[in-house]
Image: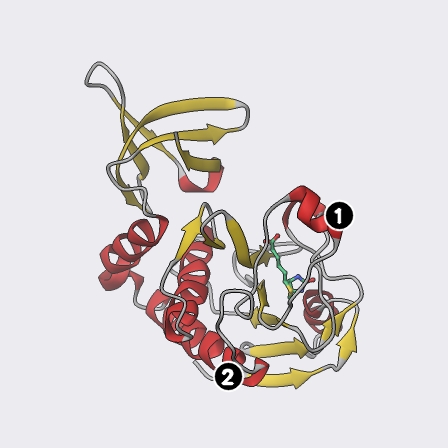
Amino acid sequence: MRFQRIHHGATDSTSERAFAAIESGSARHGDLHVATGQSAGRGRFGRRWFSPPDEGLYLSLVLLPPPPPWSPAALTMATGLAVFDAAQALGCKDAWLKWPNDLMVGRAKLAGILVETRGFHPERPHYVVGIGMNVRQRTFPEELRAEREVTSLALLGIDVSLERAEECVTAALGRRVDDLGDIANRETELCVDFISATRLLHQPVRALIGEEETRGTLAGLSIAHGLLLHLIGGREARLPLEFVRELERV
Ligand code: BTN
């Protein structure tokens, strides 16, 4: 996939810039909005994304595909894997994916992804894939550290430029989004890669759908049938991917 890079310098949020372009009708499939810093970077569940200038990677990809053969769940998995692949390419071998697509090292978050759509129309789907990666930060604000553990490539001893980080993320993103176009032949690979990146296969897990918790051993994952859990007593549960809010080892 080819990207058209749109550089904003400092902005409110690259995802907001992407939606503004979609709403004005000027957006193209493959537009990649990149910023040096964000004053209103946002994360999942309405959280703020800490976006100091020239320290992190902040980018949002516009996807305006023809009605795609893949589901939003497949896109979420593919983008998580792209960031995972990029971290490996940058020398971060210990990264893993926390459901659905937080990039972690140990218990600390290194990168996050926000896949959004507004006014979704099945015949004219659009998605904005926002990616934030902590690259050169050496400190994080107290209020963020109070919420969760965070890290950056620099704190992990990986000294790379923002340009190099962007190069690796966009190369991996291009490959993973291209693979989605051939999902009929690549679904198994996507699921195997994803489950391996979560490190949860054959592990005892708890999955949350709404407030309902299911506990079992993770036995597999497929786009069509969801997560397969082996429950106590020999029973099985299949949980649709788009409804699983949390999945973690117990
Ligand atoms: C999360 O893990 O909560 C998702 C974080 C996504 C942050 C990125 S930074 C670039 C893009 N613009 C935003 O405002 N958010 C995403």
**Residue 240 drawn at (x, y percent):** 39, 36
Q: Amino acid at mark 1?
A: Glu
In the picture, the disc for residue 101 is none
Report the side of 53 relative to 125 (left or right).
right
Quarter of the image where one finds residue 86: bottom left
227 to 57, vertically: above or below: above
Disc 2 on helix, strand or loop? helix
Label 2 neighbourhood size at 10 Å, few (<14), some (14-19), many (20+)? few
Relative to the observer, which residue lies in front, 87 or 129? Answer: 87
Q: Residue furthest left?
A: 234
Looking at the image, in which quadrant does ligand 1 appear?
bottom right
Residue wearing tag 1: 143
Quadrant assignment for the C terminus: top left
Label 1 neighbourhood size at 10 Å, few (<14), some (14-19), many (20+)? few
41 to 216, vertically: above or below: below
For marks 2 and 1, give the one nearer the viewer.
Answer: 1
